Amino acid sequence: MNTKIIPRAKIPSLIRSLRQQPVRIVFTNGCFDLLHAGHVRYLEEAAGQGDYLLVGVNSDRSVRRIKGPARPLIAEKQRAEVLAALACVSGVVLFSEPDPYRLIELIRPDVLVKGADWAAEQIIGADLVRSYGGKVHRVDLVPKISTSEIIRRIVERYGRSASEKGE
């Protein structure tokens, strides 16, 4: 197993260890179903906000609740493994809740990062992070690059039957 994939139970000790060093912890989260250039640019900008980028990844069950029964396309462990392979990502943790609020409470990041498609007042955990002096950073998204858009183009090009069969 990749050492950058951190079991949720180990997060408190990791955070204590990081806090003993002068490390600026950055947290972001998402489904990251089909990793694409938009994700990579987003994660690189997030990493630039501090010293340690911890990425929360929605579990398969959580993705189904958010995106519907046909998602995710890639299983949670594989999504975590791909993210952990990126140089800009310091750690990856899976979470099953519908939103990352409890994980944000546990981590108490110095910087919370979300895409600019989220209105500032809708960013889950932003109020908490700001309450202890943390920063919320919104990243502009790359136009026309999203997992949903990629799926739409595949279905358009190859037809619904290929997507339904899981090809």
Image: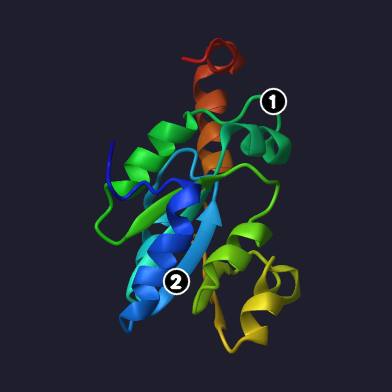
Q: Is residue 5 above or below residue 53?
A: above
- For label 1, count other residues whose C-alpha is less than 10 Å away and answer few (under 14), some (14-19) or many (20+): few
Residue at mark 1 to residue at mark 2: CA–CA distance: 31 Å
Q: Is residue 36 above or below residue 138?
A: above
Q: Nearer the viewer, residue 138 or 60?
A: 60
Q: Position of residue 12 (x, y in %)?
A: 48, 61
Q: Position of residue 137 (x, y in %)?
A: 53, 77
Q: Position of residue 100 (x, y in %)?
A: 63, 56
- Left-right relation of 121 to 57: right
| Above or below 124: residue 66 | above
At a point 74% along the width and 68% down the height, the residue shown is 122
Residue at image mark 2:
26
Quadrant housing the N terminus = top left
Answer with the quarter of the image where residue 13 lies: bottom left
Residue 23 lies in what quarter of the image? Answer: bottom left
Q: Amino acid at mark 2?
A: Val
